[in-house]
Amino acid sequence: MARRERVMRMSVEQPLWRALTAYRLLTMLYAIGLFVTAQDRFVRPWVAIGYFAVLVVWTLATLPRVANAASCTKRFLTADLIVALTGILLTPVAIEHSRIVSGGPTLPSIWTAGAVLAYAVKGGWRWAAFASLLVGVANVVQRGAFSRDTLHNVLLVCIASIAIGYVVEVARASERTLARALEIEAATRERERLARDIHDGVLQVLAMVQRRGTALGGEAAELGRMAGEQEVALRTLVAGGLVPASRASEDASQGALVRAVEEPDEPADTSPRDLRPLLAPHAGSRVSFAEPGAPVFLAPVAAKELAAAVSAALDNVRRHAGTDARAWILVEDEPDAVIVTVRDDGPGIPEGRLAQAEGEGRLGVAQSIRGRLRDIGGTAELISVPGQGTEVELTVPKVSRGKAGSGR
């Protein structure tokens, strides 16, 4: 059967790259504005003009480089930081010394912080600390002395970049954890689906072959014994996990990538389906079927899974209550939910038997009934009193919270 691969891409750092792109553009314009408003204080304005020409070309040409982590390579980060440091060190050449001493801005001004923040978003707080340290040293060199204003500016850039780098590292770790959790959940659902299919088909056939072979004797008894061994082995495999979680998640540049194999494609028809025709074939001499006089509509997947759960409940009646047991199916169409009750007059289920059966790999109730109802947003309640039969109440909301709501 054709299967679909669902791909979910998650990234909390992508907005940071977009913000960094905008920051570089705005701070480039801000630095140029500072020069235009104070160009009379420049002793060599041609130096500033030359630098700003390079800065504008560099900023605009490298916008794609700060669009995501993959494009922001180490080589680009190095060149970007060199552009920022060059602007800082050229400041004493272009501006009169008195303005520098009085705390005037460097040529690139706060554009420099963008280069440091790129290190933070790309490599975390350690890369940010390295870049901010170089910027701090360059500021001290261009001023010719270590002042309070210099310390304030350096600490501001350093603390902000390190904090952002740390947040990015935490976010990436959270993405990986979430991706792993989603992958495990998807693998678990696939395992449960396969377990239900195997229980409803292969395991029941093997159990029947074992019973009939034992009853016939001779070579058939040996065949029954072998079928029983295979049934036990297959139940153990189902209980242990058919689909182990793979390492399909990866730390991609655009965020954590999760691939999960979904169930086979269902028919494209998503129109509501009447539940009654799906349950009517169960009616017979030992099974009574009571239904409303009007159609009982559910989403196709919900109707199919609910009918399969009813089949599993009736199969349990035949297997555990005996061929002479009677069963009753009651369908109730409530305003907000559909309720199907399956009741029998068998001996009931001894206390603790369900937990014991699940531990032995017999997952009829756990998977074929409760698992199906859980997947479509419904619930399955089982009431059994020894000597008074068993009642299974299956409830499916009209607006399903599970897969049925998607119409798949």
Image (spheres, rainbow, N blue to C red):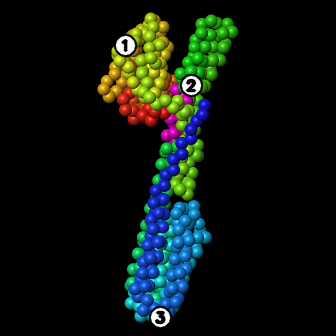
Callout 3 environment at 10 Å: few (<14), some (14 to 19), or many (20+)? some
C-alpha gap between disc 3 and disc 1: 98 Å
For marks 1 and 2, the one nearer the N-term is: 2
How far across and how far down the image is residue 132, in percent?
Answer: 49, 75
Quarter placement of the N terminus: top right
Residue that appears at 48% across and 59% down? 14
Q: Name the residue tied to disc 1.
A: 290
Q: Amino acid at mark 3?
A: Val
Query: Is residue 183 positioned above or below 199 on the image?
Result: below
Q: Name the residue tied to disc 2.
A: 198
Tell me which corner region of the image, top left, top right, bottom left or bottom right, holds residue 222: top right
Highlighted magenta segment, given as a residue range: 184-196
Residue 186 shown in magenta? yes
**Disc nearest the viewer among 2 and 3:** 3
Q: Nearer the viewer, residue 62 or 158?
A: 62
Q: Amino acid at mark 2?
A: Ile
For marks 2 and 3, the one nearer the N-term is: 3
Tell me the SS state at disc 2. helix
How far across and how far down the image is residue 144, in percent?
Answer: 47, 90
